[in-house]
């Protein structure tokens, strides 16, 4: 199984969203990642940016992947931090950091930096996936962006961030899923459920996963733990188990595609290439 959504951070790097006294106010290392995955039969992990707020985090992810190739299969950088680069400098930056995807995040599509959104055609042209982590209409936006850029793979984080089923009806989310499933270059990531659906009976959470898996099919679904974000609610293994519960209706071959082979395809997983030991960023690039 490939865990398509995990994070690492070093507090010395500065992560403005991490507050003292919270469970996240500590450094999480590659060694912690390896320990959290023991006995989970993982074949690799996709590291996802953690909103440090500068382009240096993208370099850090690239270097972690190079240092731990048996543990980290790929990485997804932060697109927001590349706002203002322009297409040519952005393409150069991608060639240096070699991400498997770049993630755009915010409360909504319109709340993300316009100059970061303007780089999406460059991703499409270079075959780098776009990850979306939006808290409003994420699935609908993914379908719209994917339709505008047919060569672009758009990966929707956390099932599109549906509201907690304890307080909201999933009807609107289901409709967005049905429509997005008609756009062939949208991929659904089954992740974040242990946190977002806290307090909801597991069978209802499984119904969400099953609905998305049926709509998109096993060739367009991947799975992730969202470790260590999940830790206040449960372990990495518990997070992945909850995500997998909704795959019970799939055959063994279909389940394997969700758990591993679809991720290998959509993220273009291959051995990383080191571009040399020279620093990738000047101080003015931060």
Image (cartoon, rainbow, N blue to C red):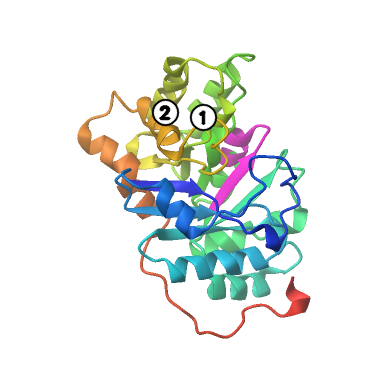
* Other residues around mark 1 within 10 Å, as few (<14) / some (14–19) / many (≥20): many
Q: Residue 59 or 92: which is nearer the viewer?
A: 59
* Other residues around mark 2 within 10 Å, as few (<14) / some (14–19) / many (≥20): many
Q: Is residue 271 within the magenta segment?
A: no
Point 49% across, 26% down: residue? 178
Asked whether residue 118 appears in the rendered view, the answer is no
Residue 218: x and y in percent read 33, 37
Verify CB contact (< 8 Å) between mark 2 and mark 1. yes
Q: Identify the residue position indicated by label 1 in the image.
A: 194
Point 64% across, 44% down: residue? 24
Q: Identify the residue position indicated by label 2 in the image.
A: 242
Asked whether residue 91 appears in the rendered view, the answer is yes
Secondary element at image label 1: helix
Quarter assignment of residue 254: top left
Residue 210: x and y in percent read 39, 24
Point 33% across, 28% down: residue? 247
Residue 269: x and y in percent read 38, 60
Taking the image as shown, residue 75 lies to the left or right of residue 53, namely left
Q: Is residue 136 within the magenta segment?
A: yes
Quadrant location, the C terminus: bottom right
Q: As displayed, is residue 282 above or below residue 80?
A: below
Q: In the image, which residues are magenta?
A: 130-143
Residue 68: x and y in percent read 42, 66
Mark 2 or 1 closer to N-term?
A: 1
Q: Residue 276 or 41: which is nearer the viewer?
A: 41
Point 58% across, 85% down: residue? 278
């Amino acid at each position: 199984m490939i865990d398509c959504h995990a994070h690492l951070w070093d507090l010395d790097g500065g992560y403005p969203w991490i507050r003292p006294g919270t469970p996240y106010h500590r450094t999480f290392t590659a060694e912690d990642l390896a320990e959290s995955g023991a006995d989970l039969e993982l074949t690799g992990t996709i590291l996802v940016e953690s909103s440090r707020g500068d382009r240096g985090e993208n370099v850090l992810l690239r270097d972690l992947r190079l240092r731990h190739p048996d543990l980290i299969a790929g990485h997804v950088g932060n697109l927001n931090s590349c706002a203002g680069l322009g297409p040519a400098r952005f393409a150069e930056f991608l060639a240096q950091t070699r991400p498997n995807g770049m993630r755009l995040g915010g409360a909504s599509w319109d709340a993300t930096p316009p100059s970061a959104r303007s780089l999406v055609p460059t991703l499409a042209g270079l075959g780098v996936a776009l990850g979306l982590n939006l808290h409003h209409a994420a699935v609908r936006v993914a379908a719209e962006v994917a339709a505008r850029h047919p060569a672009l793979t758009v990966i929707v984080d956390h099932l599109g961030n549906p509201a907690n089923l304890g307080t909201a009806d999933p009807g609107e989310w289901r409709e967005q899923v049905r429509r997005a499933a008609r756009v062939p270059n949208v991929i659904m990531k089954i992740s974040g459920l242990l946190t977002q659906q806290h307090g909801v009976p597991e069978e209802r959470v499984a119904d969400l996963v099953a609905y998305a898996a049926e709509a998109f099919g096993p060739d367009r679904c991947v799975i992730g733990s969202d470790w260590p974000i999940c830790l206040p609610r449960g372990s990495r293994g518990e997070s992945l188990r909850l995500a997998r519960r909704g795959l019970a209706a799939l055959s063994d071959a279909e389940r394997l595609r969700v758990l591993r082979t679809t991720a290998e395809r959509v993220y273009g997983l291959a051995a990383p290439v080191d571009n040399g030991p020279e620093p990738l960023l000047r101080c003015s690039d931060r």
